[in-house]
Amino acid sequence: MSSGEGPPTHLVRVLECKQGAVRAVRFNVDGGYCLTCGSDKSVKLWNPHKGTLLHTYAGHGYEVLDARGSCDNSLIGSCGLDKSVMMWNVSTGESLRKFRGHAARVNCVCFNEESTVILSGSMDGKVKVWDLRSRRNDPIQDLDEAKDSVMTVSISSHLILTASLDGYTRVYDLRNGQLTSNCIGESVTCASLSGDSQCILTSSLGSSLRLMDRETGELLAQYSGHNSKDYKVESCFTPSDTHVMSGSEDGCVYCWDLVQSTLTNKLEHRGSTVVHSLNPHPSQPFLLTASLGQVWLWSAHPQT
């Protein structure tokens, strides 16, 4: 994607997911498909570009809070209020594994880049690492530095990034065996790495969106205008790293220029109150957003 490309602000379509409230929406690894997590305990696989439902995965005991696709698109990992992490066969819909070990709801999951392990972050303050090549059902590692709920976990190359309600982001450098903790000062509900892994974008309760230097913790920029005081509202970089975007409790997604910190666009979701989940396409100028029972697909280009 060229740096001259604008942010995804043109509505392409709205999906009626029919799975209760959509708790999260995620593109798969190449952006051709997406996953939606429902309060009706299901995970659904879609082609958002055509608006077609491809498969429904049912087996969680309570609401599903997050789901991710593996690097070869053969597996889905999901988690939720039932304290478990489930692995699914994408094509058959079969439940392959169920990992238990967290003492509370599991908020987030992510695969490593080879999809040999899956990480899960929980309200119990722990990140657990599960080995998908082993038949063992206990975690191979616990990251237990957080003092409160772990809200997001992500992996980029050799870096693991977590965000916690204890007010810290933590970066685990697997290459050097180092942990870098940054105190944000407010409960952190979402954190993501920029494309070059040099910056961290953090959302926190209190309507604060901050751009931090990953290594020094220096505050590089702040973005304001959105509202996130009561809910976990996600934020992200655009694929080109030219803009940052955030959901909001007023039914909009806000878009700012990364460097100037100026608000450039507001994406209205008519009939919605809280837009809590959003996910950028891995390479192209598309964005998925979720509110109530709907998922919205946005593009940088007007639809003809």
Image: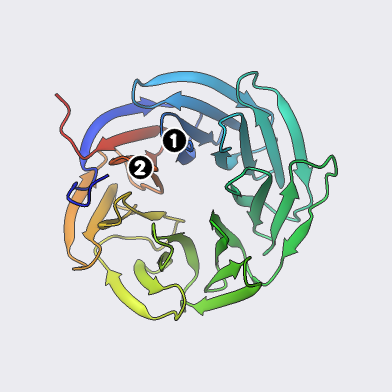
Q: Nearer the viewer, residue 272 or 33?
A: 33
What amino acid is at disc 2? Ser
Q: Which residue lies under the disc numbered 1? A: 30
Q: Note whether 144 is above or below 101 in the view shown.
A: below
Q: Quadrant of the N terminus?
A: top left
Query: Residue placed at 65% from the left, 18% from the top?
Result: 92
Tell me where residue 268 appears, x and y as whole percent: 23, 43
Q: Earlier in the sequence, mark 2 or mark 1?
A: 1
Mark 1 closeness class: few <14, some 14–19, many ≥20 residues within 10 Å: some
Q: Which residue lies under the disc numbered 2? A: 283
Tell me where residue 174 appears, x and y as whole percent: 63, 65
Q: Are marks 2 and 1 in contact (CB under 8 Å)?
A: yes
Q: Nearer the viewer, residue 152 or 292?
A: 152
Query: Residue placed at 38% from the left, 34% from the top?
Result: 295
Q: Is residue 65 visible?
A: yes
Total labels: the figure holds 2
Quick one: SS at disc 2?
loop
Tell me where residue 300 appears, x and y as whole percent: 21, 40
Quick one: SS at disc 1?
loop
Residue 72 lies in quadrant: top right
What amino acid is at disc 1? Asp
Q: Note whether 161 is above or below 21 in the view shown.
A: below
Q: Nearer the viewer, residue 183 or 249?
A: 183
